[in-house]
């Protein structure tokens, strides 16, 4: 894997070209001793829902992933908090004013900017805005609109962290919309369903087995007669050819049953 500072050839402090790899995330100048660490940049993502369970999404106007769907957000400026940064980005991109930003979770990401890989930590905030009736696409956004949660497909979003974040954010929400059948009560729903399905399958199978019951019962009766004749009648098990008596008994019993059926 290429070192994250591979494009940095000169020391940013003294300008020396002896700027060499120090460890997996830093370089050190051999002349002045300055060590530069390449740490993740902080970025924000806004999750804005309206009263109809729709999420505000944007369409990217610039690379990377130009033309794909995205969520409002961007890099945090110096001396900003995460809440201030997400509020500013939402205002710059949509014209909406964030009244409250509640932190949800964060995901690491690699953002390609001008051919340079920028490692970021994307922080997701659930945002409440003052007025949703008027918003527009501004800054690096080509279009913005509300999309029903049931119609959101993470694969339509161009950035990896946004796709992963949507999956994480929507899972519990869609579970609640579908009646709350999450992992906690999944088996409470499935066990009764399995019982009902099993009962129905048993009834259907019985309809197929009932016509075959006379043959199964005949086989069982024949097996019992064999045990009685072969094992319980002493004369049948004497001598070298003990099976002969059993065979003749079976043949005689078969002839008797045929005559009984034939003659009524």
Image (cartoon, rainbow, N blue to C red):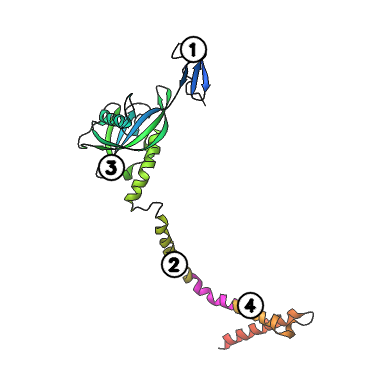
Given residues 188 and 117, the one toward you in this image is 188
- The CA span between labels 1 and 4 is 98 Å
Q: Would you call the spot at circle 1 few (<14 residues within 10 Å), some (14-19), or many (20 or more)?
A: some
Quarter-of-image position of residue 143: top left
Does residue 210 show up magenta in the picture? yes
- The CA span between labels 2 and 3 is 41 Å
Does residue 8 show up magenta in the picture? no
Circle 3 or circle 1, nearest the eye: 1
The x and y percentages for residue 37 are: 46, 22
User: Is mark 2 in CB contact (under 8 Å) with mark 4?
Assistant: no
Circle 2 or circle 3, nearest the eye: 3
Q: Name the residue located 77 percent from the left edge and 79 percent from the top edge.
A: 241
- The CA span between labels 3 and 1 is 55 Å
Which residue carries the number 2 mark? 199
Q: In the visual, does 91 lie left or right of 6?
A: left
Look at the image and tell me in which quarter the C terminus lies. Answer: bottom right
- Provide the residue span drawn in magenta: 208-219
Circle 1 or circle 4, nearest the eye: 1
Label 1, secondary structure: give it: loop
Which residue carries the number 4 mark? 223
Main structural element of the magenta stretch: helix, strand or loop?
helix
Label 2, secondary structure: give it: helix
- The CA span between labels 1 and 2 is 81 Å
Which residue carries the number 1 mark? 32
The earlier-in-sequence mark between 2 and 4 is: 2
The x and y percentages for residue 236 are: 73, 83
Label 4, secondary structure: give it: helix
């Amino acid at each position: 894997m290429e070192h994250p500072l591979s494009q940095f050839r000169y020391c940013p402090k003294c300008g020396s070209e002896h700027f060499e790899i120090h460890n997996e995330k830093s370089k050190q100048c051999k002349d002045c001793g300055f060590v530069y660490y390449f740490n993740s940049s902080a970025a924000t993502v806004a999750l804005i829902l309206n009263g109809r369970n729709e999420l505000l999404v944007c369409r990217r106007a610039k690379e990377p992933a130009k033309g794909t769907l995205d969520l409002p957000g961007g890099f945090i400026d110096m001396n900003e908090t995460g809440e201030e940064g997400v509020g500013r980005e939402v205002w710059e991109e949509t014209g909406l004013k964030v009244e409250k930003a509640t932190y949800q979770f964060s995901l690491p990401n690699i953002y390609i900017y001008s051919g340079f890989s920028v490692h970021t930590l994307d922080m997701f905030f659930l945002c409440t805005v003052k007025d949703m009736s008027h918003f527009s696409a501004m800054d690096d956004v080509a279009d913005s609109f509300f999309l029903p949660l049931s119609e959101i497909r993470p694969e339509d979003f161009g950035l990896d962290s946004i796709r992963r974040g949507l999956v994480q954010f929507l899972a519990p929400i869609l579970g609640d919309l579908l009646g709350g059948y999450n992992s906690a009560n999944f088996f409470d729903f499935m066990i009764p369903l399995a019982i009902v399905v099993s009962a129905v399958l048993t009834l259907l199978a019985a309809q197929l087995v009932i016509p075959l019951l006379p043959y199964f019962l005949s086989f069982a009766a024949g097996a019992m007669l064999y045990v009685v004749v072969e094992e319980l009648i002493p004369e049948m098990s004497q001598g070298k050819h003990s099976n002969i008596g059993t065979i003749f008994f079976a043949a005689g019993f078969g002839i008797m049953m045929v005559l009984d059926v034939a003659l009524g």
